[in-house]
Image (tube, rainbow, N blue to C red):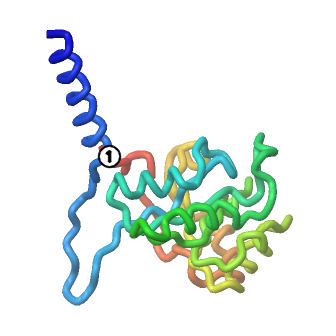
Amino acid sequence: MKIIKSVILVLFFAVVAIQAQAQNRINIPDLNGYITLQCDFHMHTVFSDGLVWPTVRVDEAIREGIDVISITEHVEARYRKPEVIGSQNRPYEIAHEYAADKGIIVIRGGEITRNESPWHSNAIFLSDVDALVIDNYLDAYLAAKAQNAFIFWCHPGRIKDQPDTTLWMWWSLLRVQRAIFRIIASLPTACQWDVLRLS
């Protein structure tokens, strides 16, 4: 009887483990003539303020049914992690190599993180993330632009910065408009990002 209970428990936990690894994909149909890819272009690892290694982000993408990821570390800060010194390109290289035979596309990216508007912006499709580590934030945008990056504002409507509204501030637009032409800034307002989290 003890053996039967043990076998049942082992089988139960095996089924639970298998279900935990199953894809959690949201089914979004392809559009006429196009293939729809599910993407996450804002991820962090231990190389900035995340808690996991880049390979874990690839495994999460597989589990969640995501086709394309970009690890966009805060390029200005390695925070408390002296063990992850070196090139800003390293997180991408680790994830890209690990994902090579797993069907996940990894795009090189970085997050330009400053304390002045537009605060945090991601640049993806970069060729060299190290080129964004520049004191002047406009120069960081120009370095991304020089690499034909696609740049977008990470946290429109962040409560800390704009507690009563979500606006692209005119002075930010004037500063950045001179440097970047691919930034998402065509709408004067945006939805509060914390309201749009999916349950």
* Quadrant in which residue 72 is drawn: bottom right
* Quadrant in which residue 113 is drawn: bottom right
**Image quarter of the C terminus:** top left
Residue 82 % position (x, y): 81, 45
Residue 25 appears left or right of 124: left
Name the residue nearer the viewer: 67 or 1. 1
Residue 155 % position (x, y): 54, 55
* Quadrant in which residue 87 is drawn: bottom right
Q: In this view, does 108 lie above or below 114?
A: below
| Element class at badge 1 | helix
Q: Is residue 93 above or below residue 158?
A: below
Amino acid carrying label 1: it is Gln
Residue 149 % position (x, y): 61, 80
Residue 118 seen anywhere in this rendered image of the structure: no
Name the residue nearer the viewer: 32 or 180. 32
Residue 183 appears left or right of 58: right
**Image quarter of the N terminus:** top left
Q: How many marks?
A: 1
State the residue position of label 1: 21
Residue 156 % position (x, y): 52, 57
Residue 145 appears left or right of 134: left
Residue 199 seen anywhere in this rendered image of the structure: yes
| Residue reaching furthest to the top | 1
- Say which residue appears at 52% left-offset and 74% top-offset: 184
